[in-house]
């Protein structure tokens, strides 16, 4: 009887010790659970739990439920969450490097987006490390298109339109096109469209489908302006507090998530645009006049970005062009 009791105590001690060593990380995300970025992150979290033998559990908080989109990066920097996902270009006012992926017409395909990501990574890692962050992986959105609540055939048709901006880059596109930008996070987009706060935007087909924009908008122009990327990053202190084995687990699964997420985006891209059309939107390429205006806007913004990003921006573009 005494031996049985001793064995039970030892087993309980081992169990409690294992539980004590397990760590739980919160991962806030701005997009809904149905979005492919969030689904990919859940697969990543499950894989980390497996390869760490349960020592690291990542809990996904979708749809801005833990922190709003604009709060996620700072929350991870401060350790209020250990890991998070953010469209870094939304923080270009902190450092122009963060908008490397959103300069119009620099990288307009999945292949070009991947080449640009690889070229930017050393510089981006340096900038993030200065903010107590470590990048883990990034996944592109499909190419950005223009949405309107009316047909738009000439640059004059865009003037004065209220435009949803999600970062300084999209706000600048609106300004150069003569539109009126309003900053609106993904979680608030549906209400903004329904109430007429905005009646135009530039975004991917994915966002259009997520938000059922055909209920409030009529036209989509597939301009393929750029492929913005959602970046997953971790608090540097939290990362360095992991064992070497779990760090390896985390980084290996992050690499897998980057490849998997990119494949998901590429596979879904055409379907998103088809879904817009199936739900009554007029889906077309832009007119020659709109194309000419967009080219002019792209040239202006490329020059502005290179000036604002300085040596870091030049290093990224040099590495990109050398590939």
Image (spheres, grey):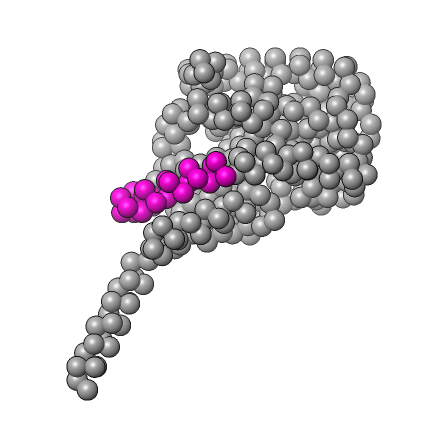
Span colored in magenta = 238-260
Considering depth in this image, is 269 or 301 the residue closer to the camera? 269
Give the position of the N terminus as an image quadrant.
Answer: bottom left
Q: Residue furthest bottom?
A: 1
Residue 201: x %, y % from top left: 70, 32
Considering depth in this image, is 313 or 227 the residue closer to the camera? 227
The answer to whether residue 237 is seen in the rendering is: no
Q: Residue at x 34, y 55 (%)?
A: 53
Q: Is residue 293 above or below residue 122?
A: above
Residue 68: x %, y % from top left: 55, 46
Quarter of image, res 266: top right
Secondary structure mostly taken by the magenta-highlighted segment of the chain:
helix
Asked whether residue 91 is drawn in magenta, I would say: no
Give the position of the C terminus as an image quadrant.
Answer: top left
Asked whether residue 252 is drawn in magenta, I would say: yes
Q: Residue at x 42, y 19 (%)?
A: 312
Q: Residue furthest left?
A: 3
Please give left or right for residue 33 compared with residue 148 in the image: left
Q: Residue at x 48, y 13 (%)?
A: 321
Residue 300: x %, y % from top left: 61, 13
Count of marks, rendered view: 0
Residue 230: x %, y % from top left: 52, 36
Q: Is residue 34 above or below residue 261?
A: below
The answer to whether residue 134 is seen in the rendering is: yes
Please give left or right for residue 79 compared with residue 173 in the image: left
Q: Residue at x 65, y 24 (%)?
A: 224
């Amino acid at each position: 009887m005494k031996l049985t009791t001793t064995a039970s105590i030892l087993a309980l001690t081992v169990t409690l010790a294992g539980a004590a060593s397990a760590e739980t990380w919160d991962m806030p995300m701005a997009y809904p659970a149905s979005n492919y970025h969030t689904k990919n992150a859940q697969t990543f979290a499950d894989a980390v739990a497996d390869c760490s033998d349960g020592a690291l559990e990542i809990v996904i908080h979708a749809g801005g439920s833990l922190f709003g989109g604009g709060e996620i990066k700072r929350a991870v920097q401060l350790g209020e969450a250990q890991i998070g996902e953010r469209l870094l270009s939304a923080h270009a006012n902190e450092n122009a490097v963060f908008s490397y992926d959103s300069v119009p017409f620099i990288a307009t395909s999945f292949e070009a987006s991947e080449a640009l990501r690889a070229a930017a990574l050393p510089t981006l890692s340096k900038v993030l490390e200065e903010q107590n962050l470590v990048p883990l992986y990034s996944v592109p959105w499909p190419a950005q298109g223009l949405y309107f609540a009316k047909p738009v055939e000439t640059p004059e048709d865009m003037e004065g339109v209220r435009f949803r901006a999600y970062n300084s880059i999209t706000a600048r596109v609106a300004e150069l096109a003569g539109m009126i930008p309003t900053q609106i996070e993904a979680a608030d987009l549906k209400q903004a469209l329904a109430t007429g706060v905005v009646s135009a935007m530039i975004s991917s087909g994915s966002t259009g489908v997520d938000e059922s924009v055909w209920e409030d908008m009529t036209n989509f122009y597939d301009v393929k302006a750029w492929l913005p990327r959602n970046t997953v990053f971790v608090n540097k202190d939290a990362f360095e507090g992991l064992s070497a084995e779990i760090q390896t687990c985390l980084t290996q699964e992050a690499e897998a998530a980057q490849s998997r997420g990119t494949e998901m985006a590429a596979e879904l891209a055409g379907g998103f645009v088809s879904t817009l059309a199936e739900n009554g939107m007029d889906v077309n390429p832009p007119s020659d006049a709109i194309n000419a205006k967009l080219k002019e806007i792209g040239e202006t913004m490329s020059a502005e970005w290179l000036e604002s990003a300085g040596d870091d921006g030049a290093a990224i573009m040099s590495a990109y062009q050398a590939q």
